[in-house]
């Protein structure tokens, strides 16, 4: 079960990095098809989910 939480954390972290990169790409190329702040909000929320999954996985492994 601990591996599941690590996998979910990595998926959330990768999604956050992709959203962050798309946000910067949209800013730099001036091609904004979705308001740019939403990409950064998505990146922050994905990072929070990644931290949650890591912490929950660490605590569930100790039980």
Image (cartoon, rainbow, N blue to C red):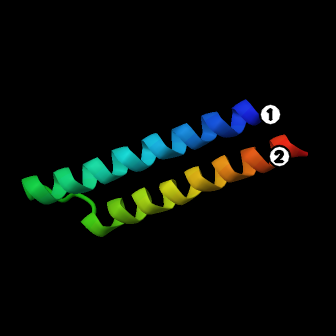
Q: Horizontal placement of 34 versus 11: left or right?
A: left
Say if mark 1 contacts mark 2, CB within 8 Å.
yes
For mark 2, does the 10 Å Cα neighbourhood hold few (<14), some (14 to 19), or many (20 or more) residues?
A: few
Q: Nearer the viewer, mark 1 or mark 2?
A: 2
Q: Residue furthest left?
A: 29
Q: In this rendering, does residue 1 appear at all?
A: yes
| Residue at the (27%, 48%) spot, across then down | 21
Quadrant assignment for the C terminus? top right
Quadrant assignment for the N terminus? top right
| Residue at the (74%, 46%) spot, across then down | 58
Q: Position of residue 17 (x, y in %)?
A: 37, 46
Q: Secondary structure at mark 2?
A: helix
Residue identified by numbered label 2: 60
* Lower sequence index among marks 1 and 2: 1
Q: Secondary structure at mark 1?
A: loop
Q: Position of residue 50 (x, y in %)?
A: 56, 50
Residue identified by numbered label 1: 1
Compared to residue 6, the image places residue 16 above or below, namely below
Q: Horizontal placement of 34 versus 15: left or right?
A: left
For mark 1, does the 10 Å Cα neighbourhood hold few (<14), some (14 to 19), or many (20 or more) residues?
A: few
Q: In this rendering, does residue 35 appear at all?
A: no
| Residue at the (44%, 40%) spot, across then down | 14
Compared to residue 47, the image places residue 5 above or below, namely above
Q: Position of residue 35 (x, y in %)?
A: 26, 66
Q: Position of residue 47 (x, y in %)?
A: 49, 55
């Amino acid at each position: 079960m601990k591996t599941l939480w690590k996998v979910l954390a990595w998926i959330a972290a990768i999604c956050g990095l992709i959203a962050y990169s798309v946000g910067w790409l949209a800013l730099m190329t001036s091609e904004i098809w979705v308001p740019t702040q939403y990409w950064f909000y998505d990146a922050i929320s994905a990072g929070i989910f990644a931290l949650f999954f890591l912490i929950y996985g660490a605590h569930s492994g100790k039980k």
